[in-house]
Image: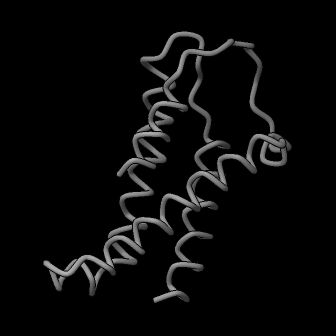
Amino acid sequence: MLWALFIILITLWPGTYFPRMPHFLDLFQPDKLIHLGVFGVYVFLQIRGLVSQPVYPSLRKNAVGIAFLSGFFLAGGTELLQGCCIPMRTGSVYDFIANMAGCTTGWLIGRRQR
């Protein structure tokens, strides 16, 4: 949960706005690696936390799916909020794709660790 709070804080922090049209090559910008890493760690930590909690067996059983879905909603939600509500920030479909690549990476690693 602390990692989710960290993600929300860094993605919703007001930034500098440089208007330009998105381009397919934006998928290969260096900041996309940061998106990938942050969301990969998030999903991995969610899986580890849900699997290790002793109280709710259904959370342990469905940890991988729950972690991936929460990553999906966090990734989409932060991009939507950046696009409509945060001054000098823009939401980006390419950032969302990088976020989801990170979620998938965290899911694959976490699934193997189970």
Residue pictured at 42% horizontal, 74% vertical: 48
Q: Position of residue 67 (x, y in %)?
A: 39, 67
State which quarter of the image contains the C terminus: bottom left
Observer-nearest of 73 and 31: 31
Q: How many marks?
A: 0
Q: Position of residue 68 (x, y in %)?
A: 43, 67
In this rendering, is residue 36 above or below 106? above
Q: Is residue 43 above or below residue 89?
A: below
Q: Quadrant of residue 80?
A: top left
The front one of 112 and 97 is: 112
Q: Tell me residue 30's x, y (percent).
A: 83, 43
* Left or right position of 70 against 22: left
Which residue is found at the position 33% from the left and 77% from the top? 63
- What colouring method underlies this structural image? one colour
Eyeballing the image, is 42 above or below 51?
A: above
x%, y% of residue 54? 20, 81
Residue depicted at 62% across the width and 35% down the height:
92
Q: Determine the residue located farthest toward the left in the rendered image.
A: 55
> In screen coordinates, is 95 left or right of 48?
right
Vertically, is 82 above or below 59? above
* Image point (61%, 41%), residue name: 93
